[in-house]
Image: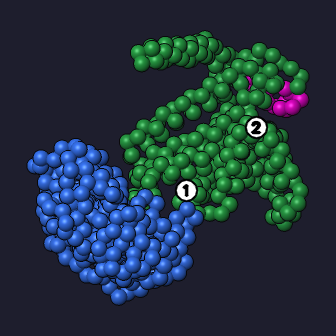
Chain colours: A green, B blue
Amino acid sequence: MSGNKANRKAFKALFYSFAGFLFLYSLYLFLSNLDQLFVTEAAVKTREITDVWGDDREIMNQFAGGFWKDPYFWKSLNLTVVTTLITTLIASIVGIPTAYALSRFRIKAKSIVEILFSSLIVMPGSVIGICLIIMFNYGPLWDLQNALGFRFAHSLFPGMVIASLVLSFALGLSAWKAAFDSVNPRFEQVARSLGSSRWRAFRTVTFPLAKSGIIAGIILAWTRAMAEFSAVLFFCGTFMELPSSRFSEFTKFIQMDQADWVSVAVWAQVEFGNIEYGFALAFVLVLIGGISVYIMHRIGAKGYIW
Amino acid sequence: MIEISNLSSDLGEFHLRDINLTVNQGEYLAVLGPTGAGKTVLIEYIVGIYKPEQGSIKVNGEEVTELFMEERNIGYVPQDYALFPNLNVGRNISYGLEARRMPPEQIKDIVSDMISRLKIDYIRHRMPLHLSGGEKQRVALGRALATEPGVLLLDEPLSALDENLRTEMARELRRIQRSVNGTFIHVCHNFEEASEVADRIAIMNEGRIIQVGTLSEIMEVPANEFVARFVKTQNIFNGVSDGSCVRIGETEIVKENSHTGNVIVAIRPDNIEIVENSGQENVFTGVVESKKLKPYFTEIFVKADIPLLVLCKKENSFKEGDKINIRIPQEKVIVIKNSE
């Protein structure tokens, strides 16, 4: 008995020291490179940059005095935040009722639906991206786009929303289902036996009890959408040279034109030699992700929203 | 009053077969059966969690079989009480009244009345997490009774309580049922518990109701061997009857009965008398094989021609190996047709 206890203690000590070492080392690497945020000149100037990005946007050369002065950065951020919020909203509106149905009703194809979405979670983003390309560029969905007069792929909306929605929805769904599963269905049955409609029983009993799990699901869905990279890159590409469309004026108006999804922008900048800019964008992503998860956890824990 | 007619259904693992049951207004019925007999499933069909494949359920004369749970006016206290953990005791009790959109003053009055009737004033503002088993049970009862249901279903309400509290709460349940003159259906697997609370007992096994009757009816005239065993008629034997006596192996017991051929003979241990003299009708001599002291009596295992369990007073001088005469009164011998 005491041997087991000692073993557990030793394991705990080993685990925490290893995890702590990894954490501190990552923190050290990150902090020691923070000076990269404040570079005023491009480290590398290659011909490709001007070829691809255009003469009028020699990014790092206009970037004197910090990345936050560059409109490209703010447009990217704007684009990502707005699009991921739309994605999260759609995922929540569809996902929360679906998760409730999967958790509470006896549905025949339930296990198939669950396996389908669970397998999406473990799928690489590139696979999702290529599947979306095939799905939307052939067959009935292609005909639909022709009928509507605009393309889904390589578009801000719905292209980016679709690309980020797939994994965001899948991850959110599993979290929301787990949240509903954790609430004893007896509560709802008793509430209904007392004369509550199904909706009132849900609103007054199940929902308040599943609240923190639902918030956790929303956080997961949002952060997953924000972190999406390969699916967005595959399905939408980069946006610097987005062909003009009927929405061009509108995207310009809402300050989202000629910008990239932040996680794609990180890659794009590094790809073209602007490692510092890439690092700066990555830093912003880490900051936003960390702060938002913290804030939403606090809100969820205190139940302020409802 | 509740009337269940020809209720049959299949839930895969559990099924109900041709359930017919009537519980009168103000009656307390216990549904008793072993684990897996279908008792809880029966409750779930009555409350409306599932819709039966055939049969009908009427509450106070009104057909409710096709109604949603919220339209049936059937109170339900599940085994784990399912008190809403996000609401305090008062809000739990007022939940059903709020669902009926009653005026707040009326809700307040009903809740106060229920709380004082159940003697739970001191926990009115407490959350369910901080209640003991007995308190939880009272709150669950109060919540279910506040809406004045046509019938109240209790699914093993005492199983989560410890032994001492169980007896106390069983009496309390009975008192509450009397005070509201409610129709109660109480599911349990414990014969003592059922006998403590119920006016009538329904014995259930393998999705069927085997027998319904008062405690003494079930104990004195069990419908079959299963019921006899379930109500703890310890001495059960296979025998042969000729109408005037039954033969168990070499032993012949005089008993006028209506069966001939293979029968089950059951003798309750509390019906066997220890007598001084042999030579009377149905008196057998045996040896005390072992003796077990119980709280209110002593169990004696007697080896006569047939092994018998006999109950006698706690104070007795019998020792293991003693020879004793035991008498089995003819009217106390239960003879059941052996259907196998």
Q: Callout 2: residue from which chain?
A: A
Check residue A53 for magenta coloring.
yes
Q: Is residue B338 above or below residue A290?
A: below
Q: Which residues are magenta?
A: A49-60
Taking the image as shown, residue B257 lies to the left or right of residue A39, namely left
**Which of B169 and A103 lies nearest the eye of the viewer?**
B169
In this orientation, which residue lies closer to the viewer: B33 or B55? B33
Residue at the image point whose x is 47% and y is 49% from the top? A182
* Residue A103, disc: 1
Amino acid found under the numbered disc labelled 1? Ser
Query: Is any part of residue A119 visible from this angle?
Result: yes
Neighbourhood count class around disc 2 (C-alpha, 10 Å): few under 14, some 14–19, many 20 upward? few
Question: Which image quarter is the N terminus of chain A in?
Answer: top left
Q: Position of residue A67 (x, y in %)?
A: 66, 25
Tell me where residue B309 appears, x and y as whole percent: 28, 55
Q: Which residue is mark 2?
A: A124
Where B219 sits versus A64, above or below?
below
Q: Is residue A204 left or right of residue A220?
A: left
Amino acid on which the number 2 mark rests in the picture: Pro
Q: Position of residue A108 (x, y in %)?
A: 65, 63
Instruction: Name the secondary structure under disc 2.
Output: loop
Name the residue: 51% across, 51% down. A181
Q: Is residue B45 visible?
A: no
Left of A13 or right of it: where is B286? Answer: left
Query: In the image as oriented, which residue stretches furthest toward the bottom?
Result: B61
